[in-house]
Image (cartoon, grey):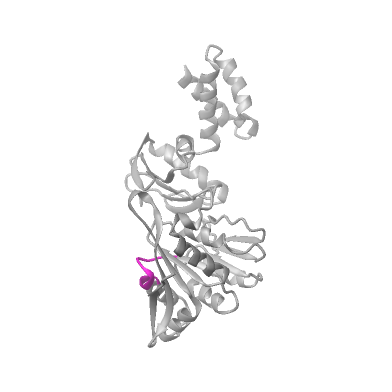
Amino acid sequence: MTAELRQRLRAAVVAGAGDGALVDGGRLTEMARAEAPLLTDAEIEAVVADVVSAARGLGPLDPILLDGDVTDVMVNGDGEVWVERRGEVARAGIHLDGNEVGRLIERVVAPLGLRVDRASPIVDARLPDGSRVHAVVPPLSVDGPCLTIRRFAARRLPLSAFCAGAVSDHLHQAVTERRNILVSGGTGAGKTTLLNTLAGDIPARERIITVEDAAELRLEQPHVVRLEARPANADGVGEVRIRDLVRTALRMRPDRIVVGECRGPEALDMLQAMNTGHAGSMSTCHANGPADALRRLETMVLMGDVALPLPAIREQLGSALDLVVQVARGPGGRRSVVEVARVEIVDGELRTLAVEP
């Protein structure tokens, strides 16, 4: 009975797609009671909630996304759903067919003016709550469409959640003293979460401009401007790169610039910003340690269209960066600061020297 009612309500929503009222829970409840008067209020409420979720949200994934302990949701090509909860990856006990996964992906990307199909089989997007979404569809995804959702913490964690008191005090002092900070770490190590925590210590009187691929940072200061990159549209035009936004931010009278992640030539623009009156700026990058992070930044700058010699790049890095903070994920999924290093030029070479707070 409930399955038949669910199908009829979904059909009514599809038939009246132009009438937003049909996705209203109250109206659907009235229709359900008229269609199935023998069902209990609890049964009708469950059916209506399922239909509304399928029409507005991400359907069967909604209960998972409401779980605050879930940090990643992964839908594989075979329809198996996996989640990461407190650092452990496990099956979610849900199986979706390929058509349903395709509809979920379309529901995420369509409002953003993006497209995903055989001609454009890879797409990055974000949910309204800031969660990052990455999707790959056939022919690149051989077994069916794949969907990955990276959740972002709804609240800012204190520095004490990442490190002990002495290190926490040292990092807080570095932020207030306008040191330029790079947070490095592996995938899922907590770089963005730590960056959000560090940037949260910036004084409220300062104007902060954030630049990100997908707007995840949630700063509570009163004077924050958020800029978000944009991929090319289906015709291959309209792309706005992180590098373009960093240059734009420099013209917006920032006190500090916070770049969600350096992964390409924008590293040079970020370093120049740090060297030209925007002390206290921050960013992140993927690296296994502070020394690796500096080498990665060198490589990123060399990827650009400005043919700087390596010694000049190292001079820029040495004068721009003050601290590299390495964050890692340990057993049980806990993210913590494992090293804080000071950046210096020693005998013409970039060095990271461990900080003893």
Q: Is 354 situated above or below 18?
A: below
Which image quadrant for residue 289? Answer: bottom left
Residue 314, horizontal then vertical, whole percent: 43, 82
Horizontal placement of 223 versus 267: left or right? right
Farthest residue to the top: give it. 38
Which residue is located at x 47 percent, y 41 percent? 65
The answer, for residue 137, to whether it is visible in the render is: yes
Quadrant where the C terminus sits is bottom left
Q: Nearer the viewer, residue 160 or 120?
A: 160
Which residue is located at x 37 percent, y 50 percent? 333
Q: Nearer the viewer, residue 88 or 344?
A: 344
Give the residues drawn in magenta, as a range: 285-293
Residue 142, horizontal then vertical, whole percent: 32, 48
Q: Nearer the viewer, residue 139 or 169?
A: 169
Which residue is located at x 38 percent, y 79 percent? 351
Query: Quick check: is 289 in the magenta stretch?
Result: yes
Residue 247, horizontal then vertical, whole percent: 58, 72
Horizontal placement of 137 versus 44: left or right? left
Q: Is 52 situated above or below 286?
A: above
Which image quadrant for residue 219? Answer: bottom right
The answer, for residue 213, to whether it is visible in the render is: no
